[in-house]
Amino acid sequence: MRRIKGLGELPHLAGKRVLVRVDYNVPLTRGLVASGDDAKLRASLPTIGHLTERKAKVILVSHLGRPDGHERGLSLAPVASRLEKLLRRKVLFVRPDITADHGAEDVLSKLRDGQVALLENVRFYPGEERNDRFFARRLASLADLYVDDAFAVAHRKHASNVGVTRYLRSYAGSLMEAEVHNLNRLLKRSGSPFVVLLGGAKISTKLPTLKKLLKVADEVLVGGGLANSLLRARGLSVGRSEVPRQEVMAARRLVRSRKIVLPSDVLAASSLSAGARTRVASVDDVRRDEFVLDIGPETTRDFAARIKRARTIVWNGPMGVFEIPQFSHGTMSLARIVAARSSGRAFGVVGGGETIVALEQTGMSDYVDFVSTGGGAMLEYLSGHTLPGIAPLLA
Ligand code: ADP
Ligand code: MG
């Protein structure tokens, strides 16, 4: 396995401008980052600290949400204020368009050695997700060196994590390094049975990885909205739980795998809201006017038994709409089982934005051997893929 270049290998930093790709894609509550939602910001502090202590000028870049062009509601300004509180120092927020003449450069020229700036949401620029060469070069021109600390987007090939590396010497931040180190550890000692617990909203984003995971894992237990697509592909009804046709088509190619374990029962609800009428239904007995919003108790017991037998456990994706307490039981029960089985008999890794939120609600996060900040990125890494965002950081 090739080595990743870490912060220790950066050249002399004093006075150097360092562009740092971070993952500050956090939920905003009434336009603010709530204190319980700033885990990603806190996770970036070691890398920022390393650079500022050595008197570099730190220029942070991140995306937030999926804006369609410039969307005021998805500005990173509230993130800058939260970061100021965590760092206990001023963060220069760079509002002007970096592709326009001078504006952003003028603001950045005020940045002193050891200070921190944050650029506006990089997905406001169409060139970011297209990995446009001119945009990447423009972004790179703001700095002398590049550090990538955004593992969660490493499976994407965007300008701010792949494009810029053509123009700047590139290194992994400490979070990125820890991710790679721990996931390699799992790959090296992945004992059998290797059980993957997979849930979440949609299958389309996770389908390519699911295919590859089937090669390394012994069992893939599927719940959440993901399971709905597979159940539909088996010809079962999931009522009003919307499954786009494409998703069903995609799922068809997978349902035959013997390694995939689907729910046998589900929680069927009259609506997608707190206070909905609910009942436990067998998967062949969901009514047309019902939504499928969680796995059922029989499935929870079955998945739990399989997780207990595992020596390697990987979990990504909630089993249901756990944000609403009524539909959280499957996710919360299995979160506790995954945590309890990890750091002991099994090696357990949990990853993904919403998945980590669920795990934290159990108060058992510390039991898990490694909590990855990546959902899709983690799954792809574990399926043996060199991620486009990591390749440029290898020695
Ligand atoms: P992660 O961020 O951990 O990788 P995803 O983003 O893939 O997870 O999916 C998380 C979302 O999936 C949650 O917000 C949850 O409400 C939703 N979800 C889970 N099960 C269902 C379901 N049966 N129907 C609709 N949405 C679901
Ligand atoms: Mg998510």
Image (spheres, rainbow, N blue to C red):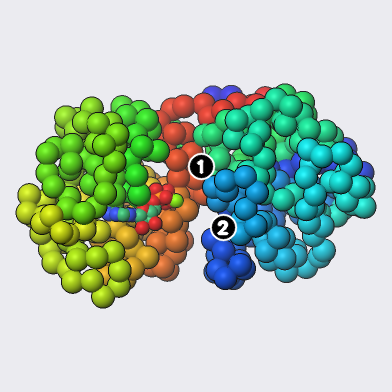
Q: Residue at x 23, y 46 (%)?
A: 228
Residue 114 horizontal side relative to residue 188, left or right: right
Residue picked out by circle 2: 26
Residue 225 horizontal side relative to residue 80, left or right: left
Mark drawn on residue 170: none
Question: Residue 140: x and y, percent?
Answer: 78, 33
Q: Does the image show residue 340?
A: no
Q: Nearer the viewer, residue 124 or 310?
A: 124
Q: Is mark 2 within 8 Å of ligand 2?
A: no
Q: Nearer the viewer, residue 256 or 4?
A: 256
Q: Residue at x 45, y 40 (%)?
A: 376
Q: Are marks 2 and 1 in contact (CB under 8 Å)?
A: no
Question: Residue 226: x and y, percent?
Answer: 29, 45
Structural crowding at the residue carrying mark 1, measured as other residues with C-alpha within 10 Å and reported as few (<14), some (14–19) or many (≥20):
some
> In the image, what residue type sits under mark 2?
Val
Question: Residue 202: x and y, percent?
Answer: 34, 44
> In the image, what residue type sits under mark 1?
Asn
Q: Secondary structure at mark 2?
A: loop
Residue picked out by circle 1: 182
Q: Secondary structure at mark 1?
A: helix
Q: Nearer the viewer, residue 326 or 13?
A: 326
Q: Quadrant of residue 157?
A: top right
Query: Distance from label 2 to label 1 (Cα)?
Result: 23 Å
Residue 99 horizontal side relative to residue 200, left or right: right
Q: Quadrant of residue 293?
A: bottom left
Q: Residue at x 29, y 41 (%)?
A: 244
Q: Earlier along the polypeptide chain: callout 2 or callout 1?
A: 2
Q: Residue at x 55, y 51 (%)?
A: 65
Q: Does the image show residue 275?
A: yes
Question: Residue 159: x and y, percent?
Answer: 66, 33
